[in-house]
Image (tube, rainbow, N blue to C red):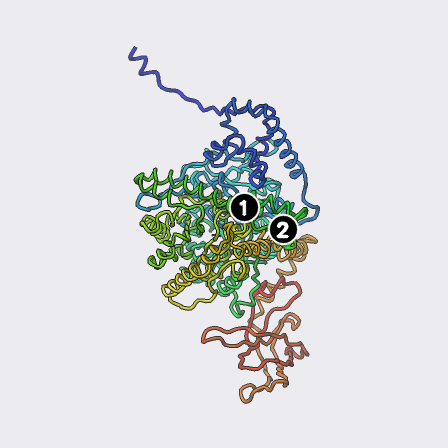
Amino acid sequence: MIGQLKDNKIQLKRIFIESTLPDALQPLKVLANNIWWSWNKEAIALFEYIDKEQYIALRYNPVALLEQLSPKRAEELVNDKDFLQRLQGVVREFEAYIAVSPEAGSPKIAYFSMEYGLHISLRLYSGGLGVLAGDYLKEASDDNSNMIAVGLLYRYGYFEQAISLHGDQINNFPPQKFTKLPIQPVRDEQGEWVKISVGLKGRMVYAKVWELKVGRISLYLLDTDIDENEWHDRSLTHQLYGGDNEHRLRQEILLGIGGIRALRALGYDDADIYHCNEGHAAFLNLERLKNYIQHEGMSYEMALETVRSSSLFTTHTPVPAGHDYFHEDLLREYLYSYAAELGIEWSRFVALGKIDPHNHDELFSMSHLAIRLSQEVNGVSELHGAVSQKMFKVLYPGYHPEELHLGYVTNSVHYPTWIAKEWNDLYLETFGNGFLRDQSNKEYWRKIHNVPSEQIMGIRRKLKARLLDYVRETMQEDLTRRGENPRSIFELINAIKDNALVIGFARRFATYKRAHLLFTNLERLSSIVSNSDRPIIFLFAGKAHPADGGGQGLIKHIIDVSKRPEFRGKVIFLENYNMEMAKLLVQGVDIWLNTPTRPKEASGTSGMKAALNGVMNFSVLDGWWAEGYRPDAGWALPLERTYDNQDLQNELDAESIYNILEFDILPTYYEQDENGISEKWVSYIRQIIAEVAPDFTMKRMLDHYYERFYHKLAQRGRALRADNYAGARQVAKWKHTMEQRWDRIELAQADTFDSDNRALQVGEHFYADLKLYLNGVSAEDVGVEVVFFSRVDEEVLKLQFKEELELKEVKDGVATYHCELDPKLAGVYEYGFRAFPKSGQLAHRQDLPLVKWL
Ligand SMILES: *Cc1c(COP(=O)(O)O)cnc(C)c1O
């Protein structure tokens, strides 16, 4: 007997039992498998109706919900006529939506991003960059853009945050079960799962391709956690922003090079535009270069023109941690043979990401690589565009920051995702038909002025109550889990007052966002929150990167403050910020607070989500708020810094926050009539809805990308590709000639207004005649201009104006350029002359950034 038991080893096989939904409920599965449901209020309501408690417990994941649906509940639903009818309605809407194809001839865009924030149930994002990419795809779908997207499928994604009793951040990495995500394997014609490979340090690493449907748009996700790979390589797609610098390099090779291979394997190697969302994906253009060289027989230079003419790079932050750098030695281990395949020397390869290619220790910048391989580059707000010009001016010596061909499109948010159902119902009813397809048109939004104050405040109160219920519930759970004593939990929950003014602050806890600013002077803050006639609650949430000790310190500090008796129930930190919590917060608070260090907030988008929902912003005039702020629709801290010393600046900013809170915000909010309504407050709500929100809807942002970049790129890309790439060949040849000969140009003689010895009288003309030895360069290919600056301080010059000189004659290899101008301005200026390559074939001045000051 005993012997038998010994031999009786447990033998297990794996089986996947698919749930079978009754036929009548099958359409739910179709809906669950396209993330479109997540921005359709009626579809959300259906899933909630099935089993709200379970739905929330499953993190709003309808695939999981349907899989776990009990036969009993299924039967109830099958017999629920009203439910089935609503289901049919949503399915009809979905089918009609999906059936539309992009307009013929609209440019085809391939969008690459390291992260996508589409929904809480898809942990493929860490913060704003991802949410922006997710919102963008949703709008591209709604707007019927011809777009496909590429990213990585993370087994563990970004971490889930818990907080210990002592306020330390705990990073959890629960795995995602791919069978419970709305993703499908991509199969080829033989029915085989499409698989690509990239060489990483001499070893082949394989990735399978999944498809995630975002409405009409396909997002292709690469997954290396497959049997074909060794353990080390399987973990390549485990975490978002995890691991060391080498790990990041490996991920980026997979995303960029592997991403293009995936598109090629799917037959999509014909996009008109490749949009690189942040520098992580910049290797994609290397693989495109290689394809042109190997498959089209192009020279490196010609391939470069072809690639550049169809590439857009969006840079997202001036904060150094947001830009990836790799040491040349590391890069060599991975890409040395790749450079050889491009047919270029290693030094020329590393020059793509460096300022000085001969400086061995200068790190290779992914942003510089992205810029050099893209014709168009943009920042994400007007201010950030200018900041980026300064940051990248090192790439263009001889040019002034404002002259750089680096534009901007201000970020935005996807209206259907972030709007509360209650507001959406009101807007649709009040604004009328056409509003949804014309979201940036203020004429619609201004109809909010016809809505009575009671109705507006009714919605606001309802959303606040929903948020505070959530806060009580989660605090009860979180604090119990932490082992907090029941009495203080009870006191805290009781201290949360429904009629309080609620201020929210939630975002990644990067130190530049200064989450601690409010706590600079605790006595002052305490006196503000202790007035029981004017209750006030501060809600904080956000994750700090696991490697960011500073950010984690800020969280701990806030937790400590929140435990003090005077702040109990008034300062609250909510664990594990995510997109669902973000919705509750931006819809439920009265004020959204943002206090970044200037000018480091490139855009910020959570405040826009708040604005859509009639929530006031109180923020530093940085990023989007510098464009969105109006004095009758929110509050601001000034744009300019007063102090160079950051500590002094922090103190001053904190002081301003206390003053504005105490003497402006609180009195405005609490100046209430007998119905508890402050008319002034409601007028602010109306203003932010009517005048601010419409400028920050994703529709406007998508339109701007088309107007400013996509159309232009599509046109130039086509022009260069036509006639078997004749245009690309020509541009490459011309640039090559100019580069070879540029240094030969010399100033022969200058005859200009004598500014050394006398002042130019207003009304008098400034003139210049410059003679250049061209030494083999054609005079038509050389532009000469005069540039006037005014001096701001020792280091900073401000460009005032420039004017091109006219080519007068060419004689014996000497070209004469002339100008005569009336400056019309009085004052002291500094001016100079410079030559630049000139051709109708260039997309813009920095397309060939040679310049010679004369
Ligand atoms: C919108 C959003 C962000 C971005 O917020 P910022 O204001 O840009 O910092 C980050 N995380 C989540 C979960 C969001 O929903």
Left or right: where does residue 559 sit relative to residue 607? left
Query: Which amino acid type is marked by label 1?
Result: Ile
Q: Is residue 282 visible?
A: no
The single residue placed furthest to the bottom in the displayed view is 757
Quadrant assignment for the N terminus: top left
Within 8 Å: ligand 1 and the Cβ of disc 1?
no
Q: Nearer the viewer, mark 1 or mark 2?
A: 1
Q: Residue at x 66, y 71 (%)?
A: 780
* Residue 304 or residue 202, whichever sits in front: 304
Query: Which amino acid type is marked by label 2?
Result: Gln
Identify the residue under disc 2: 439
Q: Position of residue 253 (x, y in %)?
A: 48, 47
Q: Quarter of the image holding residue 381?
A: bottom right
Quadrant assignment for the C terminus: bottom right
Identify the residue under disc 1: 459
Q: Is residue 390 visible?
A: yes
